[in-house]
Image (tube, rainbow, N blue to C red):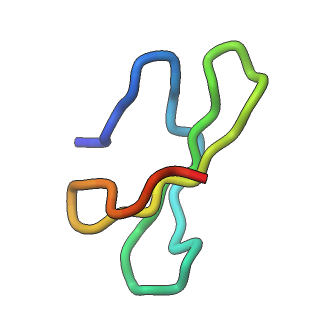
């Protein structure tokens, strides 16, 4: 199960911060911004950037 936030959708998954955990690249539904969601197991571990 992927984490979700209203108005955002996941578009890619990779280990962006090279810590051995899969992170998620999400985009706003209106397409104006992207965020990387750094994951710690099934939870976000840091605020998205």
In this view, 29 is above or below 26: above
Tally of numbered discs: 0
Residue 2 location, x and y as percent?
A: 31, 42
Q: Quadrant of residue 33?
A: top right
Q: Residue furthest bottom?
A: 19
- Residue positioned 22% across, 66% down in the render: 41
The residue depicted at 33 percent of the width and 55 percent of the height is 44
Tell me: 19 left or right of 11.
left
Question: Which residue is nearer to you in this view: 20 or 40?
Answer: 40
At x 69%, y 40%, the residue is 34
Q: Nearer the viewer, residue 22 or 37?
A: 37
Q: Position of residue 15 (x, y in %)?
A: 51, 74
Q: Residue furthest front?
A: 47
Where does residue 17 sit, x and y in percent of width and height? Answer: 55, 78
Q: Is residue 49 left or right of residue 20?
A: right
Asked if residue 39 is positioned above or below residue 16 in the image, the reply reads above
x and y percentages locating residue 10 in the rendered image: 51, 38
Task: Describe residue 21's horizontal placement relative to residue 7 as left or right.
Answer: left
Above or below, comparing residue 9 to residue 44 in the picture: above
> In the displayed structure, does residue 45 sit left or right of residue 48?
left
Vertical order, 17 against 5 (above or below): below
Q: Quadrant of the N terminus?
A: top left
């Amino acid at each position: 199960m992927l984490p979700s936030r209203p108005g955002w959708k996941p578009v890619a998954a990779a280990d962006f911060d090279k810590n051995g955990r899969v992170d998620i690249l999400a985009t706003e539904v209106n397409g104006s911004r992207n965020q990387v969601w750094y994951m710690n197991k099934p939870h976000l571990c840091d605020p998205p950037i």
